[in-house]
Amino acid sequence: MTDKMFMGASTKQGLDIANKSREIIRGLIGDDVKDLEPIERDIVERIVHSTADPEYAKLVKISPDFVDAAMASLRNKETILTDINMVKYGITRYEGEVECYIKNEEVVKIAKENQITRAAAAMRYAASNDFEGIVVSGNAPTAVFEAMDLYAKGEMNLKAIVGVPVGFVGAADSKEALHNSEIPNIIVEGPKGGTPIAVACVNSLIQHL
Amino acid sequence: MTDKMFMGASTKQGLDIANKSREIIRGLIGDDVKDLEPIERDIVERIVHSTADPEYAKLVKISPDFVDAAMASLRNKETILTDINMVKYGITRYEGEVECYIKNEEVVKIAKENQITRAAAAMRYAASNDFEGIVVSGNAPTAVFEAMDLYAKGEMNLKAIVGVPVGFVGAADSKEALHNSEIPNIIVEGPKGGTPIAVACVNSLIQHL
């Protein structure tokens, strides 16, 4: 990552703002991230940058194999599969595919037939359509549970999960389950999470390619 | 708004989660929102739903004319202009146009020539291309400042600003300036804000159309 690219800034004014922001963030969360690897630290800094919420420095948990597994997948230009379109459109500068199937007709059908969320149905759809890559959930705990389940059954070729769904119902449980699994993962403890957290994590990794 | 549509849920499982979430949120922030009008309360509940951060109930400030001005604009199917694409793709079920010009070639040129951010340049571009509607900024304080400036000069036909940019540099100032202006507005006090807050606000209004 060059300083020029930090936080996606592409103009002089944008870059000045990004650099000043980084200084402030380091002042706020330096102690929390001092034991992290450089890429892990960048991820956490970018999450705090995109939420202005320093509490994330305490809540983000990264499995020891996450960065290596995710970077290998991204280097191979494997697919990034997001739970909702907002996350998809926040991910920038990736040379591989970024997919979201939540509005796919087949997915809507699978959801109705099985009485599951469209986010979960989209995982089933991807798994049965040769998906290989990273699952990114910023919103739907049901997507995380479904991806874990498909992985456990050997039906989904996923390399890592960015599991940061937000909400008071199911989100914390899904993230705890993911963090206790053998899948390389990054999570946010508790109900907090969401699109900006998912996007910050992925874009941070992409900048290190 | 029907209960069926709450929070965008469209399946039985999604609806159950949304309803349980709403109960929990009302327990957490009921006191903070008890003096708000029903639509204002829905906006704040949806913001807390999409961030799992009850602090937003204390930080969101809505000008008394915001809901009426924004609803009138949306009823007329005027344009929703967002600062970044992530916000654009989070807005759903709107029958008018949702536009974002940050990647427009002309905008990139304006930004370079004037040494301003692309987010600010996009406001100038919209203003000089017959924009009429609501400006929604979830990320760039420079977009808020520029839109306010264009409005003050009589050069931008905006009806309301959803001004919830996030960040430690400039964001709080831009929001305070906006809230002290005569433009109908909703803001978040301090550095917090971001895409989910902007999207929650707009989607909540759309559900009340």
Image (cartoon, coloured by chain):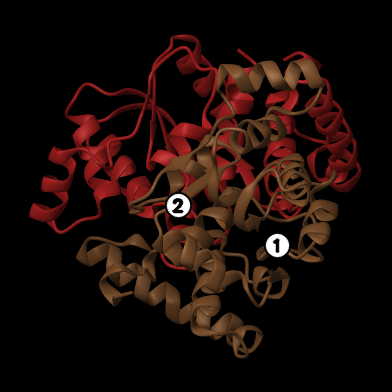
Chain colours: A red, B brown
| SS state under label 2 | loop
Residue B183 is marked as 1
Q: Is residue A58 above or below residue B36?
A: above
Q: Is residue A40 visible?
A: yes
Kindly indicate the quadrant of the structure image that contains residue B77: bottom left
Few, some or many residues within 10 Å of mark 1 (<14, 14–19, 20+) = some
In this rendering, would B183 be left or right of A165? right
Image location (x, y in percent) of residue B27: 54, 85
Instruction: Report the amino acid beneath label 1.
Output: Ile
Image location (x, y in percent) of residue A106: 13, 39
Residues tagged 1 and 2 counted as in contact (Cβ below 8 A): no
Q: In the rendered view of the protein, which quadrant contains the C terminus of chain A?
A: top right
Instruction: Report the amino acid beneath label 2.
Output: Glu
> Of marks 1 and 2, which one's residue comes earlier in the chain?
2
Q: Is residue A163 visible?
A: no
Q: In the rendered view of the protein, which quadrant contains the N terminus of chain A?
A: top right
Name the residue nearer the viewer: A135 or B82.
B82
Identified at 66% across, 78% down, the residue is: B64
Residue B78 is marked as 2
Image location (x, y in percent) of residue B141: 75, 44
Name the residue nearer the viewer: B94 or A61.
B94
Image location (x, y in percent) of residue A51: 68, 49
The residue furthest top is A76
| SS state under label 1 | loop
Kindly indicate the quadrant of the structure image that contains residue A10: top right
Identified at 55% across, 72% down, the residue is: B67
Q: Is residue A154 above or below residue A56?
A: above
Kindly indicate the quadrant of the structure image that contains residue A41: top right
Identified at 62% across, 44% down, the residue is: A61
